[in-house]
Amino acid sequence: MIAESRRRWWVCTALGACTTALYWPLRTASFLNYDDPQYVTANAEVQRGLTPTSIAWAFTSADTGTWHPLTWLSHMAVVTLAGLDPAAHHLANVVLHVANTVLLLLVLEHATGALAPSALAALLFAIHPLHVESVAWVAERKDVLSTFFGLLTLAAWLRYLRDPRRARYLLVALAFAASLMAKPMLVTLPILLLLLDYWPLGRLSPADIRGGVRGTSLGTLLVEKLPLFGLAVAASIVAVLTQRQGDSVSDIETLPIGFRMAHALVSYARYLGQAGWPVDLAVFYPYPHRIAWTRVAGVIILLALTTGGALWSARRAPFVFVGWSWFLVSLLPVIGLVQIGMQSTADRYTYVPLIGLAIAVAWTVAAIAAATSRFWRIAVIGVVIGGVLVCMTVTARQLTYWKDDVALYRHALAVTADNFIAHNNLGLALVSGVADDRTEAAMHFAAALQLRPAYPEAHNNLGGVLYMEGRRAEAIEHFVEALRLRPDFTAARDNLRIAESSSNGAP
């Protein structure tokens, strides 16, 4: 028992050290001009730090279109400790990612009793390039924080199952509520608990779904999770209402339901492809204008075959079925059936779903290693080591793109097409940075407007550059258009007032 605990401690330490070393370059990264101002650098409430007034604001604000008070409090806490030092804000994300990695290892090892595959699954989670966005972006604190409390929920749930008392269930509910109050991504967690009931907990027999090996019926398993389902439903309602209040939800006229369903299927395939071949990753992927139905048909076949294979393996390799189902289910809130924002897909959305694929891969590797000869066992270990080294190399390279605005958006433009957000934000970086390249900035703002004419921010930004260049009449046209598109655009209204005063000869 002592030897087992010591071995677990060493594995946790090694995982934490590896993850920290991989993400350590973020200590020199800057804040970004994409969402970071809303969350930290231009948010007066956050910059107060932890005060009674700011804490009250955190629990009543939906400024970013989402109610996530614990995320606000986490940003305020870092401001209180370190002010606006970007290193502190980045390293807070790194600390949470390291904690999530160790927690995932402990939860899996507790549930399965298998340390080696648990460690491999946690390592894949820690180093995968798709997770760079969640960790390297200060504004995505909500991702790593929500997952931290989500994993604490799983840990508390396993403890509750060992000794089912009300006080322990209350801890489960509190941890789950905290996860939802950081970001409502894990509204599917009660369903994920049902998957864990099937494997590895064995509370539901694969031979007879009406009765588990421990005499637990499916109905009983559902009833015991009803309070968690209630929290998930409440969080979903709040999320939709606040997003609608912030005009972030696309209506059916803009994106018909048939197109959304087709896009959701294609997105599943894209996420799966990026999990296995994480190249050309970007901070923003534009929404497609159209989707070829031949592509949709191909994706349907791919997903049907994959899901069919997972179902077929449910008895012999239940970890494949559970891992694949975890991936499908946990992506549902962000797959695009309810379209939030302008992005097609987002790397940050895979932070929790990839846990499922990591589980499937890790236990498949363990099963192959256990069932083959020594030669093939060594070969499998060699492939795993090679894959881990490749993942770490790609992640290290991806981190270099997140060091500042210019590097991030130039890379996005290099690997995506029609990226109006990258054009606009790169223009902002160029006009407000050390280089102050107004000519190139104006070119990027114009490119953004060519791709998306009804883009008020780009109109306002291009107007600002034109005004600085002395082209006041053209600047005024863009400020006016920005206000027509968004009547409550305060910055455009202020710029228009300044430009008109200047053109009238006012000092």
Image (tube, helix red, strand yellow):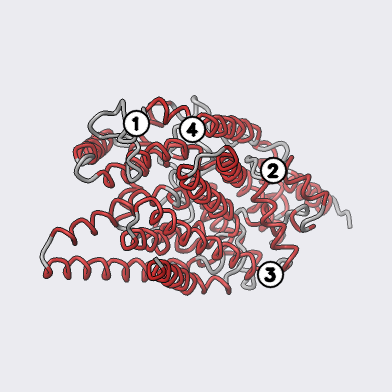
Kindly report which numbered mark, 4 or 1, lies closer to the viewer in this rendering: 1
Q: Secondary structure at mark 4?
A: loop
Kindly report which numbered mark, 3 or 1, lies closer to the viewer in this rendering: 1
Q: Is residue 235 left or right of residue 414?
A: right
The answer to whether residue 284 is above or below residue 400 is above
Type of the residue with mark 3: Asp
User: Residue 88 location, x and y as percent?
Assistant: 64, 68
Q: Is residue 194 among the parts visible in the rendering?
A: yes
Crowding at mark 1 (Cα within 10 Å: few <14, some 14-19, many 20+):
few
Mark 2 vs 3, N-terminal side: 2
Type of the residue with mark 4: Lys
Kindly report which numbered mark, 2 or 4, lies closer to the viewer in this rendering: 4
Q: CA distance from mark 2 to mark 4?
A: 32 Å
Looking at the image, do the residues carrying marks 4 and 1 touch, with CB atoms under 8 Å apart?
no
Please tell me the numbered disc located at residue 63: 2
Q: Nearer the viewer, residue 70 or 333?
A: 70
Type of the residue with mark 2: Asp
Looking at the image, which residue is at 81% across and 52% down? 498
Mark 3 vs 4, N-terminal side: 3
Looking at the image, do the residues carrying marks 1 and 2 touch, with CB atoms under 8 Å apart?
no
Q: CA distance from mark 2 to mark 3?
A: 23 Å
Q: CA distance from mark 3 to mark 1?
A: 55 Å
Q: Nearer the viewer, residue 176 or 185?
A: 176
- State the residue position of label 1: 215
Quadrant containing the C terminus in the rendered view = bottom right
User: Residue 86 location, x and y as percent?
Assistant: 64, 68
The answer to whether residue 113 is above or below residue 22 is above
Quadrant containing the N terminus in the rendered view = bottom left
Q: Is residue 267 among the parts visible in the rendering?
A: no
The answer to whether residue 362 is above or below residue 315 is below
- State the residue position of label 4: 225
Mark 1 vs 2, N-terminal side: 2
